[in-house]
Amino acid sequence: MVVQLLVMSAVLGASTFAVGMLPLSYAFSKSHLERLSALGTGLLLGAALGVIIPEGIEAMAEANSNGTPTNRIAFCLVLGFTLMLIIEQLLAPNAHSHSQQGLPIPLSKARAPDALSAVEFDAELGDLDPEGRSPDHHDIAPSTATLDPDSGRERAFPLLLGLVIHGSADGLALGVANISKGVPGTTNAISFVVFLALILHKAPTSLAFTTSILSTNLPRPDCKKYLAIFSASTPLAAIASYAVFSFFGDGDKGSLIGMALLISGGTFLYVATVLQPVSNHAPVSGDLRPASRVLFITIGMFVPLLLSSLFDHGH
């Protein structure tokens, strides 16, 4: 299980970094990114509703001989959702999404820096032009282009901080999913499903993250450093959560892992429904038609269920 987690973490970190490096050399079609984003949203929802939450409920039910602890189950789900709400709105307010485009996690748009304290980071993939480039990056004002690197770092850091926190929450889900293999009656289906969901969730986020920090006039070597930090956040959090729950979960392992899975399910639900909203009622929804968006989300939702049924022979 440790080796599997290390391999998954390495692949996840390397793929996130590799995809994030692409905007430094290539432009991407916004329509392709929108499709990938919709599919990733569906995968997050399917992983949470169809795999993570049911496994957490089952683990807690098996660990409690007096019946299913419904109050504790509900508390863990609400706790996970609330933690992400607090992180998004209070701990990293400059990295949250203001758009109703329904696209991936919040990205920055560099504003003309009349005052550095007034800089906002509120753009998303929806703010990229049809070829996937940031308009602000190409049409940037001369005063912005002459900013020194320190001002670029000052404006890009809040975005990095917010996404690192989100990445750490994703790592909790991956780490606990690998521990759940040790719970009687479970298999490796959940860890694979969570891994796949995170891979597709990270790809559009990583692309847009790099595009966004480029628009802050951050030097390219620093862009690579920021991308490396973001890419490492989820793998390191996964390994850390695996170690913590393995060490402290010996006495009541099933119940502890069940609670952790449910909390992770709550965080996934927040990301999929708030940060990447399923409903899209914006007047301009980009190049992806509503019917196509629904189709990609639906496909993504059922993929975790299909994979779970193929891998899981214990239920």
Image (spheres, helix red, strand yellow):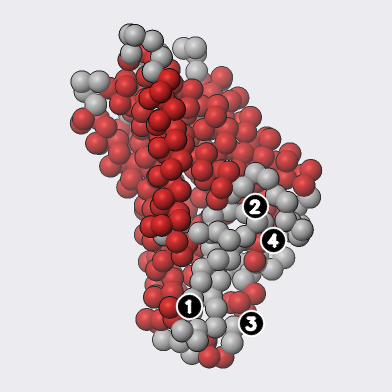
Q: Earlier in the sequence, mark 4 or mark 3?
A: 4
Q: Nearer the viewer, mark 4 or mark 3?
A: 3
Which residue was labeled with disc 2? 102
Which residue was labeled with disc 4? 29
Q: CA distance from mark 3 to mark 1?
A: 20 Å
Q: Nearer the viewer, mark 2 or mark 3?
A: 2
Q: Nearer the viewer, mark 1 or mark 2?
A: 1
SS type, badge 4: loop
Q: Position of residue 312 (x, y in %)?
A: 50, 18
Going by the numbered disc 4, the residue's amino acid type is Ser
Which residue was labeled with disc 1? 118
Quarter of the image for residue 304 reads top right
> Which residue is most to the front?
71
Q: CA distance from mark 2 to mark 4?
A: 17 Å
Relative to 30, 137 lies left or right: left
Q: Position of residue 26 (x, y in %)?
A: 60, 67
Of residues 86 and 35, which is closer to you in this image? Answer: 86
Crowding at dot 3, Cα within 10 Å, few <14 / some 14-19 / many 20+, comes out as few
Going by the numbered disc 1, the residue's amino acid type is Ala
Say which quadrant the N terminus sits in: top left
Q: Position of residue 247 (x, y in %)?
A: 20, 31
